[in-house]
Image (spheres, rainbow, N blue to C red):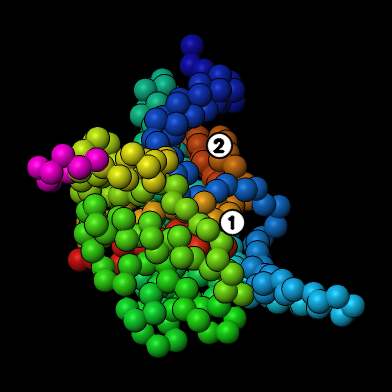
Amino acid sequence: MAISRAQMMKELLPGLNALFGLEYQQYEDEAGEVYETESSDRAFEEEVKLAGFGAAPVKSEGSSISYDTAQENFTARYTHETVAMGFAITEEAVEDNLYDSVSARYTKALARAMAHTKQVKGAFPLNNAYTAANFAAGDGKALCTQETTSGAGNFHTTIDGTAIDNMLQTASDLNETSLEQAVIDIAAFTDARGLLIAARPRKLIVAPYNQFVATRILDTELRPGTADNDINALRTNGTIPEGYRVNHFLTTANKKRWFVMTDVPNGMKHFTRTPLQTGMDGDFDTGNVRYKARERYSFGVSDYLGIFGSGNIT
């Protein structure tokens, strides 16, 4: 006896949802190594970066206290995008009892497609970290800038115009020297009022191209590439406490790029407006059964000091 479409949908939906979830979760959330995730209940989110106060002055005996005024430095805006896709099982497939095998294959493919798109969007700011026209921080500059490299007016600054560099002065392949220089540059970060913030690196983000270099730099006890028997200071000091993570969605053209995530709060952000949802219904006109997946989110940056770049290596 042929199963009715309504009965088939009722029996098939829980299994498809479970299959979708298992397949979706098989894909590592590599973007999660770059972004802090927060929820949103609006069409967009805006985060204001305040400049804070300058250094507190000494108050001499009997004198009036000094007052300062916090200033708005810039506003970062996150506009959520809806990502959705679905597939249909034909009425004929339902009649011929082919819906079970067909829907299972399609559901897995749909989960892969949704996961892939999310990772590509998460990697987009990194793939465009040095091009403000493609991706800009809240101050309108590229994600990672440097005073002499980025050019006049194209670098991050304090409110008085002093450069704040979050990339190497000279773009460099990943090696011991370049990573040590990145650590030194991160330690020199100041806030928008020029106060030292004592920033520190947390983790290294690399493409598969650099994963073996990263292992040699961070995981060996002695300095890589030398016969001097010197200790590996980066490892001994725990300079990159969370080690390195591979991001497979850095494009081939950007395979040599690497980034250091810092401990500066409210850096790279991912907002979830609508968590991943799935559903199924029937189409009266065609008789097809349709299954869909949908989620809504955004990726961006609130404070560019949350990341440090190697420079535009080609």
Count of numbered tags = 2
Judge whether 313 appears above or below 64 on screen.
Answer: above
Label at residue 61: none
Judge whether 314 appears above or below 118 on screen.
Answer: below
- The x and y percentages for residue 52 are 69, 70
Residue at x 53%, y 58% (from the top left corner): 198
Visible in this render: residue 81? no
Q: Is residue 5 left or right of residue 116?
A: right
Q: Quadrant of residue 258?
A: bottom left
**Residue reaching furthest to the right:** 62
- The x and y percentages for residue 212 are 20, 41
Q: Amino acid at mark 1?
A: Asn
- The x and y percentages for residue 148 are 34, 81
Give the structural element (helix, strand or loop) at label 2.
Answer: strand
Residue at x 31%, y 55% (from the top left corner): 180
Visible in this render: residue 204? yes
**Residue reaching furthest to the front:** 61
- The x and y percentages for residue 167 are 37, 67
Q: Nearer the viewer, residue 138 or 23?
A: 138
Q: Which residue is mark 2?
A: 278
Q: Amino acid at mark 2?
A: Thr
Within the magenta stretch, is there residue 189? no
Q: Is residue 286 left or right of residue 215?
A: right
Q: Which residue is mark 1?
A: 266
Q: Earlier in the sequence, mark 2 or mark 1?
A: 1
Q: Quadrant of residue 57?
A: bottom right
Q: Is residue 2 left or right of residue 75?
A: left
Q: Residues within 10 Å of mark 1 (few under 14, many from 20)?
A: some
Give the structural element (helix, strand or loop) at label 1.
Answer: loop
Residue at x 52%, y 51% (from the top left corner): 263
Q: Nearer the viewer, residue 116 or 138?
A: 138
Q: Which residues are magenta?
A: 224-231
